[in-house]
Amino acid sequence: MSDLKERVSYLQGLVDGLDITDATKEGKAITVIAGILKEMAEAITDIALTQEDIQDYIDCIDDDLADLEDEVYSEDFVSIDCPNCGEAIEVDASILDESDVGIICPECGEEFTPDEVSWDLCHCDFQDDYDYDDDDDDGFEDDDEE
């Protein structure tokens, strides 16, 4: 942008150096054109600066939105099957700790509690390395064994 302003200033210097006056039609036209070019260069510079400010503002909004998305769409959600219609729905994992909380299925509109959820159909993304065999290989000592 500064290059444009420099070129317009150079042109105005040429017009001034040629001793062009407003006495002739050509001189008046050249002077007006040089003045218009100066105003256009200043307007374009102002627009470019405003655009940079807007871009900075958009970047700040984008960062804030990313933080908000992280908060709202965090990994604290689990997918469970509605005990009424069987549809998989996403719920906040913290409400599953309370048995008296009612969950309304967005598909069928029926309400159910976390106690009614069949956990063997849970679509949780947890990596479970525990072996669910009946043998007691959990690495803990049982108090009743001596």
Image (cartoon, rainbow, N blue to C red):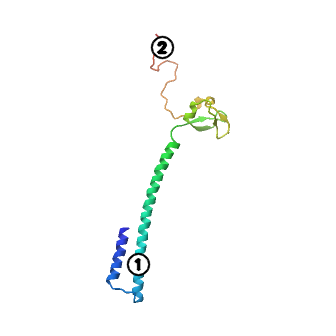
Q: CA gap, disc 2 to disc 1?
A: 96 Å
Relative to residue 18, is residue 136 drawn left or right? right
Does residue 123 appear in the picture of this structure?
no
Q: Which residue is located at x 50 percent, y 33 percent?
A: 126
Residue 29, given in percent of the width and then of the height, sits at: 42, 84
Residue furthest front in the image: 22
Crowd tier of the residue under label 2, counting other residues whose Cα lies within 10 Å: few below 14, some 14–19, many 20 or above: few
Residue type of the residue flagged with mark 1: Gly
Q: In the rendered image, which residue does mark 2 sit on?
A: 143
Q: Which residue is located at x 40 percent, y 82 percent?
A: 31
N-terminal of the pair, mark 2 or mark 1, is 1
SS at mark 2?
loop
Q: Quadrant of residue 14?
A: bottom left
In the image, 87 versus 41, the foreground residue is 41
Q: In the rendered image, which residue does mark 1 sit on?
A: 35
Q: Which residue is located at x 33 percent, y 76 percent?
A: 10
